[in-house]
Image (spheres, rainbow, N blue to C red):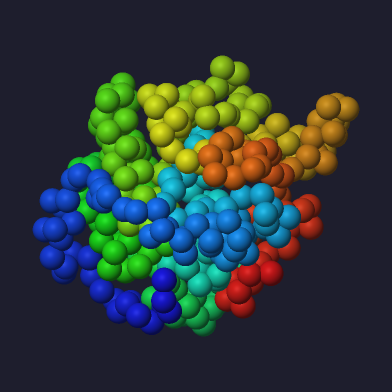
Amino acid sequence: MGSVNDVPAHMLIEDQDFAAYLEESEPQAKVIRPPAYRDALHRLLYSARTENRSTLPFPKTIGDVAFRPGEVSLWIGENGSGKSMLLSHCELGWMAAGERVIELSFEMKPVRQLQRKARQFCQGAEPAPEGVDRMLDWLDGRMWFYDQQGTVRPKQVFGISRYAADKLKCNHVVIDSLMKCVRGEDDFNAQKDFVDALCAIARDHNTHVHLVHHVRKPSDARGDRPPSKYDAKGSGSISDQVDNVFAVWRNRAKERAEEREAEGKVLTDAQREQLANPDVLLVCDKQRNGDWEGKIALWFNRGALQYCQDSYRRPVDFSGGML
């Protein structure tokens, strides 16, 4: 989609004329002859696998998961599972691969998001001032924020998403979260309409939309099993409409075992077994245009707030590109 210098990095969304983007409501439909798709079909059949830079930032998952233009991914998990943190980590990976991101977080101010990103980018709990400045310069032209917290009108979300894809050339539009965009957990029709509109925007503007959503409270109050796409709050049509579903599960049983061990308490055999398990599971529960679904084991580096593909927990230097 061009170099990161094609778009002014300090362009403020509120300064732009959004009338056309806000008023656009119908999907862009055209009647097209099959040969018009020749180049796109050849890319899809013969080179999409190697050209797609939108993957997870874990070498072991390359070839299994891809975030394709024109799709919508649903990210689900219980409160505190780390789904927004993991998405922030993924955003750095996408930007390191030369892609652009806009984040519409209606639950966290941009400066708080940058505080978290500073630790991820600088690979430690106490980033130095020069490291923070280097991160801000690195993000310049790669990332934008929409600064509004609280409930937002769907029409505004749609307009910003179209603008980000069309004018800012963003490859990824991250919306956090659905509950801030649709009032009422039981308003299933509004949820369906909202997600349907996002699917049309992703398709028509050739971008990838990421939608963060919560899950119902687990049947076991301790949350000792990963959620599935059927656990998403609200209408079942949400997971039906999107292209991909990713569930983030935090291994709290392992955390309890680690706490007991730190306190010098005797562990049961089951608790000792937990210590060898991953800290987090990322479950790809649906990938409509991919060949793989399954569980990805991850380990959490608490200082760097990064998710790592093995128990060594080595943080990644995103400023030098992907590993």
Q: Can residue 152 be seen here?
A: no
The quarter in which the N terminus is drawn is bottom left
Q: Determine the image quadrant of residue 187.
A: top left
Q: Is residue 11 above or below residue 179?
A: below
> Residue at 47% across / 41% down in the picture?
243
**Residue 267 in the image, given as x and y percentages of width and height:** 84, 30
Regarding residue 175, the answer to whether it shows in the image is yes
Judge by depth and name the residue closer to the eye, 289 or 147: 289
Which residue occupies 44% across, 30% down? 240
- Apparent side of residue 31 relative to residue 274 in the rendered image (left or right): left
Q: Where is residue 236 drawn, in percent x and y?
A: 42, 24
Q: Is residue 111 left or right of residue 89?
A: left
Number of residue marks: 0
- What is the residue that sits farthest to the right in this orientation? 269
Above-or-below relation of 185 to 90: above
Say which quadrant the C terminus sits in: bottom right
Q: Residue at x 50, y 80 (%)?
A: 134
Instruction: From the top left corner, tell me how far across and down residue 311 is, in percent.
Output: 78, 52
**Left-right relation of 137 to 67:** left
Question: Residue 242: percent from the left, percent from the top?
Answer: 44, 38
Q: Residue at x 60, y 18 (%)?
A: 220
Residue 303 found in image quarter:
bottom right
Farthest residue, direction top: 219
Q: 43 and 15: which one is in front?
A: 43
